[in-house]
Image (spheres, rainbow, N blue to C red):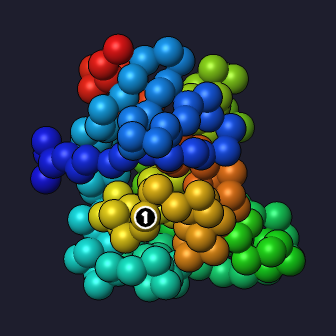
């Protein structure tokens, strides 16, 4: 739902320049953050709504095969490098089977973005458009790997939240840290920061 929001209090996330004091107040670059009223982007809501529509409500239910089947995408695992391919109505994502599980998942979501949101071959695009698509795919990966509707299942005050989320969602700690940092930045940019 557009305009849906969630209050999230932030503690310590690796790689971010902010901290929580003893009074549960967070400081970020000299500003005191009382609360973060997070409003998800349209892409986040679309991913969450799709997951819910196919019964994905918990992190352990994120099944790449089920996601692909629901979208009419053939999913294969081979020893070839991960790639996406489209020809007319045929769509396929191949995931490199030799990768660790968390990288298989991250590569899959990256390629899924290209299949769902980008048109044409990067072989024929200017480098600026390729960079834009790659940036979009990185953001999409965070949203698809750690869906909006599941974030509230975790205690964000837990000092081990990043490692717990990485394990639950089967992604790297960097993806979790980037996802949580994005939530913080989105909230701060929308003016929910006092100081």
Quick one: SS at disc 1? loop
Mark 1 Cα-neighbour bin, 10 Å: few <14, some 14–19, many ≥20: some
Task: Give the image location of residue 26, x and y in percent.
Answer: 44, 34
Task: Give the image location of residue 169, x and y in percent.
Answer: 55, 72
For the residue pair 86 and 160, the one nearer the viewer reads as 160
* Residue at image mark 1: 155
**Within the image, what quadrant is residue 134 found in?**
top right
Does residue 192 lie above or below 23 as drawn? above
Task: Give the image location of residue 113, x and y in percent.
Answer: 50, 53
Kindly identify the residue that appears in the image at 37 percent across and 70 percent down: 153
Does residue 195 lie above or below 186 as drawn? above
Image position of 12 (left or right of 61): right
**Within the image, what quadrant is residue 137 found in?**
top right
Residue 135 visible in the picture: yes
Image quadrant holding the C terminus, namely top left
Does residue 39 lie above or below 162 as drawn? above
């Amino acid at each position: 739902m557009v305009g849906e929001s969630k209050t999230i209090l932030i503690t310590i996330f690796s790689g971010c320049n902010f901290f929580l004091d003893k009074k549960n107040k967070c400081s970020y670059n000299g500003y005191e953050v009382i609360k973060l009223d997070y409003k998800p982007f349209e892409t986040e809501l679309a991913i969450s709504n799709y997951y819910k529509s196919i019964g994905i409500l918990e992190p352990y239910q994120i099944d790449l095969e089920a996601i692909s089947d629901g979208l009419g995408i053939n999913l294969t695992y081979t020893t070839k490098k991960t790639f996406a391919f489209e020809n007319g109505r045929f769509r396929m994502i191949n995931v490199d089977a030799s990768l660790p599980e968390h990288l298989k998942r991250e590569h899959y979501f990256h390629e899924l973005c290209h299949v769902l949101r980008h048109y044409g071959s990067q072989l024929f695009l200017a480098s600026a458009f390729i960079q834009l698509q790659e940036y979009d795919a990185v953001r999409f990966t965070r949203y698809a790997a750690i869906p909006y509707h599941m974030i509230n299942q975790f205690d964000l005050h837990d000092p081990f939240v990043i490692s717990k989320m990485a394990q639950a969602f089967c992604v790297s700690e960097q993806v979790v840290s980037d996802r949580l940092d994005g939530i913080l930045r989105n909230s701060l940019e929308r003016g929910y920061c006092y100081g």
